[in-house]
Image (tube, grey):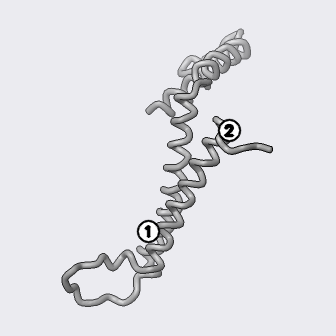
Amino acid sequence: MAHVIETGNVVGGPEVWTIRPDALEYAERVWTRTIEFLSNPLFDLGLVIIGGMVAFHAINGIRLFLAHMGWGLGRPGRPEYPYKPASMSPLQRAIFWISIAFAVFAIIYTLDAFFEVLSHG
């Protein structure tokens, strides 16, 4: 919801679609106020969290796609106690951990981009 509201404010909301004589000045004023509002560490931290979530979601989606196509699941077997989910074969488990690694990389990268947490030198 915050992203939709923020994007709507950047483009000027519904008023941007009306023909205005001061359209360029209005758009620049809305852009400047929105950027000033969003230029704080709280929104930057939110983007860090979103970056990690997007990276995990993308790679894990590939894992689920492969599972739905039957790749990496192995042969079906008789369910015996203790039950192990068939969808988490060694290949599927490896892809899951790769998605975690990509999410951690995205979080570190965005933290460094916004807060310069890694040493630059």
What is the secondary structure assignment of the residue under circle 1?
Answer: helix
Residue 112 visible to an observer of this rendering: yes
Q: Which of marks 1 and 2 is in front?
A: 2
Instruction: From the viewer's side, name the closer residue of 26 and 121.
Output: 121
Q: Quadrant of the C terminus?
A: top right
Q: Distance between the residues labelled 1 and 2?
A: 34 Å
- Position of 61 relative to 114 (above/below): below
Q: Position of residue 45 (x, y in %)?
A: 54, 35
Sequence-earlier tag: 1 or 2: 1
Going by the numbered disc 2, the residue's amino acid type is: Glu
On the image, which quarter does residue 118 sit in? top right
Q: In this view, does 29 lie to the left or right of 6?
A: right
Q: Position of residue 24 (x, y in %)?
A: 73, 16
Report the residue at 52% width, 51% height from top. Answer: 54
Disc 2: CA contacts within 10 A as few (<14), some (14-19) or many (>=20): few
Residue extending furthest left?
Answer: 81
Report the residue at 58% width, 19% height from top. Answer: 37
On the image, which quarter does residue 12 sit in? top right
Q: Position of residue 68 (x, y in %)?
A: 41, 74
Residue 19 visible to an observer of this rendering: no
Report the residue at 49% width, 27% height from top. Answer: 5
What is the secondary structure assignment of the residue under circle 2?
Answer: loop
Going by the numbered disc 1, the residue's amino acid type is: Leu
The residue indicated by pointer 1 is 64
Q: Position of residue 29 (x, y in %)?
A: 67, 13
On the image, which quarter does residue 73 sit in? bottom left
Report the residue at 44% width, 33% height from top. Answer: 1
Residue extending furthest right?
Answer: 121
Q: Is residue 73 left or right of residue 105?
A: left
The residue indicated by pointer 2 is 116
